[in-house]
Image (cartoon, rainbow, N blue to C red):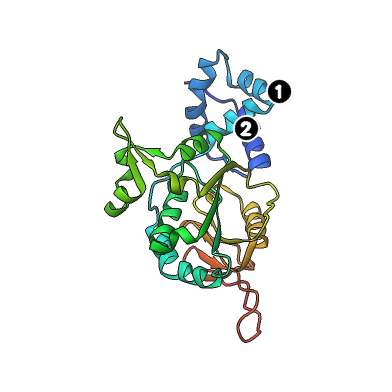
């Protein structure tokens, strides 16, 4: 396996941190493992040759492929199930009441990976709405930095092993078995999700505020300053009484304007019923 020189390692770490907020300064072995085969298969003799070539590509295609190789996309259906239980028991009843006039839900899954999380979200929503689902316009934006995983997510095709955590009643309700033995999410739910490539370091432009944003298990790779800035951008596009989910291994800055609800769940509440502003710095212990 090829080895990175200190110079090339530092170049890659600096590039990923500056452009994508991802801190890889303790991931040298990971970088070597994920890139070695690509470097040799492409005919380059060293990491330096490959990095020089990627950084010189004006189209951005080479650097995007580089990013795809270095980003982590571990995910599975029903990950951190208490989040989906809270969505069904608490958030959805609130949203159903508050959005009754428009019957529209505007959700964003900000780190969708190969699709298991956004699909779990729309299945949870559909399961809650039941017979009323056809009367609601459910819109879920699913974004990721990695363009390759977005292709997998959009297809919505998974092996039976990938579906081991999906409730049995959902298997027949939300999946179609394909001739090759794999399963595909039904068209109706796939049409509720719009997949787009997005860099979380970029400015967020939202046509209308989001009822709910999920950004789970990605900020663990960000430095605190980057994380704080991202949380602020999320807050600005969350509607009043809207929610933010983060991963259970993550935390928000202590000066966040979100109000703590429960572990890894936050709410935008600018004015309490009595007119008093809530304390903005509440965080989980």
The answer, for residue 2, to whether it is visible in the render is no
Asked whether 10 or 214 is in front, the reply is: 214
The mark found on residue 56 in the picture is 1
Q: Residue at x 50, y 36 (%)?
A: 149
- Residue 16, x across and y down, in percent: 63, 38
The answer, for residue 39, to whether it is visible in the render is yes
Q: Label 1: how many residues lie within 10 Å, few (<14), some (14-19) or many (20+)?
A: few
| Pointer 1 or 2: first along the chain | 2
Q: Residue at x 30, y 40 (%)?
A: 161
Question: Is residue 164 shown left or right of residue 151?
Answer: left
The mark found on residue 254 in the picture is none
Judging from the image, what secondary structure is the residue with disc 1 in? Answer: helix
Q: Residue at x 60, y 68 (%)?
A: 258
Question: Splitting the image into 4 quarters, where does residue 270 fall?
Answer: bottom right
Asked whether 83 or 264 is in front, the reply is: 83
Judging from the image, what secondary structure is the residue with disc 2 in? Answer: helix
Disc 2 marks which residue?
12
């Amino acid at each position: 396996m090829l080895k990175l020189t200190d110079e090339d390692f530092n170049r890659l770490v600096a590039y990923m941190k500056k452009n994508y907020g991802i801190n890889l300064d303790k991931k040298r072995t990971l970088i070597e493992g994920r890139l070695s085969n690509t470097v040799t298969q492409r005919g380059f003799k060293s990491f330096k040759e490959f990095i020089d070539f990627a950084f010189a590509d004006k189209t951005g295609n080479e650097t995007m492929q580089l990013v795809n190789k270095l980003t982590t996309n571990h995910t599975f259906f029903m990950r951190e199930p208490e989040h989906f239980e809270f969505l069904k028991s608490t958030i959805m009843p609130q949203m159903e009441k508050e959005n009754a006039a428009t019957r529209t839900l505007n959700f964003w899954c900000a780190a969708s990976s190969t699709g298991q999380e956004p699909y779990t979200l729309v299945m949870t929503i559909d399961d809650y709405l039941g017979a009323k689902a056809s009367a609601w316009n459910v819109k879920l934006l699913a974004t990721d930095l990695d363009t390759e995983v977005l292709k997998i997510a959009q297809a919505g095709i998974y092996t039976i092993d990938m579906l081991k955590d999906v409730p049995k009643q959902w298997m027949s309700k939300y999946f179609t078995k394909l001739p090759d033995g794999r399963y595909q999410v039904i068209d109706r739910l796939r049409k509720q999700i719009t997949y787009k490539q997005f860099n979380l370091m970029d400015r967020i432009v939202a046509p209308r505020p989001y009822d709910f944003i999920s950004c789970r298990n990605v900020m663990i790779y960000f430095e605190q300053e980057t994380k704080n800035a991202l949380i602020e951008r999320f807050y600005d596009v969350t509607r009043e009484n809207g929610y933010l989910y983060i991963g259970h291994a993550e935390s928000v800055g202590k000066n966040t304007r979100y109000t703590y609800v429960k572990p890894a769940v936050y709410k935008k509440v600018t004015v309490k019923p009595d007119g008093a502003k809530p304390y903005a710095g509440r965080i989980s212990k």
